[in-house]
Structure formats: structure tokens, C-alpha cells
Image: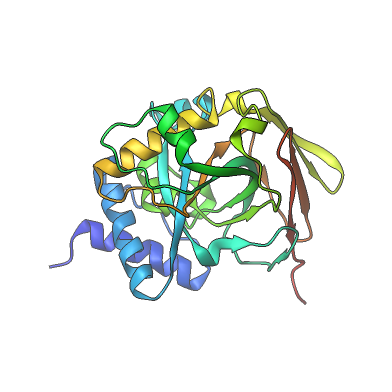
Amino acid sequence: MTTDIDTAAERILGAHASGVPCEPVRDLITTADDAYAVQDRLTERWLGEGRRLAGRKIGLTSRAVQDQLGVDSPDFGMLFADMAVPDGAEIPAGAVLQPRAEAEVALVLEHDLTHERHTVADVIRATAFALPAIEVVGSRVRDWDITLTDTVADNASSGLYVLGSRPVPLKDVDLRLCGMVVERRGEQVSTGTGAACLGHPLNAALWLADTLVRVGRPLRAGDTVLTGALGPVVPAAPGDVFEARIDGLGDVRAAFGKEKG
């Protein structure tokens, strides 16, 4: 018998496949646990289709966004290898539904994080390097009409991500105090600091490491972790080019292709 969790998963998968946003799924599921169960359905389907898991993304690291959705903790979603876009490469129009861009600190791991409870030192020791990143979030839900359950079920509103190409050891950068600026076609559209991400991007990574062990999908060597937005998210339109600069990490660009016809 089809469950509400299965029905919610199929609704989101249908939007993903068709490119047409769907209705919210909160009419079918009401709890965060149910929403993560839907996300698991999506993950298993995509893994079965040959997609490769490449890391995780953390969302809801901003207190303002948490207050908006009535939650007091972040959420997470899966990063697949085919979601990674080279720095500056064109993102085809329509590749992400209802796209928005946000600048983040990415961590790339060289060791597993499998303890039941980690320390910040564990996270630092496990991290090979940091990179500047632009996450292109998107929603399969019509008009971004989301609650916590909708975004979690929709793989934390994931889309694509772009990583910078100059790795920086953690000892060479202050991730809490680093400033961030995003420009769209030369116009400043978002600013922030590392402290905007749960007080420090490593705090977000620590939360994720502990949470993923509890749910049985621990972070592994080679994983990329998008630690969360450092400033306001910005809607993206065809033809837009975003450049994010993060002090100590350098810059990274996301270029959106123009619509054809």
C-alpha cells in the first residue's frame, strides 16, 4: 500500500523530472522525521539510478530563516557529484527550478567523522581544506511556498553548487571573521561574514557530523560539506553572473545561461 511518505516522494520526483514545480507536500507529512524519510526515498532512488553521493549541504543556518520557518536548528540534504559545476562554467537555463544563489564556505574532508559525538578539534583534524562556494538552491515546490517539512523532503531545496579551485588549509584562514561579498554582473547584492553561519562555519559542520552519525549516514573522507549561507540569498535569472569573494578563501563564479529562443 502506498504511504503518504511514498506519495510525497513521488510528487517531488515528478517535479524534478518534468521541470514543473509541484504543490507543497505538507498536506501529506507533518513531522521532520517524515520529511527526512521522504528525502531518504529520493536518495535511494537516485543512488539506484547511478548517481554518486559526493557530500552534504547544511541549510537553515541563519537565525532569521529559522524564525521564519519556526525551527531552532539547521537541516541537511545530499550533494551528488552531478550537482557540481566547474567555476565559471555555464549553468543551462532551467537546470534548477526557481534558482537562488548564496555564498558559502565549503569544507573537503580527508578523514571520516564517525564518532557519536564530535568536537570542533575532530572536525578540524578531519578537514583537508576549505574552498569558497556558491550554492544554487532551488525548490521543486511552487513559488517557494515551503515549510520545514517541504524543504527537508525536497532534499533541503538543493540544486547545484560551484566550488572555487584554490584549496586553503584551515590554519590559514579565520572562518568566523572572514567577510563575504556577492556581486551580480558587477553590482553588490549580498554581504556577510562567517559568523552569520551558526556563529562559525565549523559549528555547522560539527552539528552535521553528529546528526549524520545518528541517522546512519556519517561523513566520509572525500566528502564536500557546504556549511551554509554567509549572507542573504539572491534570486537568479537567465544571463546572471554571480561572483562571490570570501576573505582568505578567494573567489568563485556562477554563470547562468540565457534562455533559448
**In the displayed structure, does residue 175 sit left or right of residue 58?**
right
Q: Quadrant of residue 213?
A: top left
Q: If the image is split into quadrants, where does the C terminus sit?
A: bottom right
Note whether residue 28 is visible: no
**In the displayed structure, does residue 161 sit left or right of residue 6?**
right
Position of residue 142 measured from the top left corner of the image (x, y, whole percent)? 50, 54
Q: How is the image coloured?
A: rainbow
| Residue that appears at 43% across and 67% down | 52
* Residue occupying the far right of the picture: 186
Q: If the image is split into quadrants, where does the N terminus sit?
A: bottom left
| Residue that appears at 34% across and 32% down | 118
Position of residue 125 measured from the top left corner of the image (x, y, whole percent)? 46, 36
Closer to us: 229 or 147: 229
Position of residue 103 measured from the top left corner of the image (x, y, whole percent)? 65, 41
Up/down of 261 relative to 65, above or below: below
Position of residue 182 measured from the top left corner of the image (x, y, whole percent)? 75, 39
Closer to us: 240 or 83: 83
Up/down of 134 relative to 64, above or below: below
**In the displayed structure, does residue 222 sit left or right of residue 150?**
right
| Residue that appears at 40% across and 39% down | 75
Number of marks in the rendered image: 0
**In the displayed structure, does residue 2 sit left or right of residue 199?**
left
* Residue occupying the far left of the picture: 1
Closer to us: 249 or 254: 249
Note whether residue 11 is visible: yes
| Residue that appears at 77% across and 66% down | 258
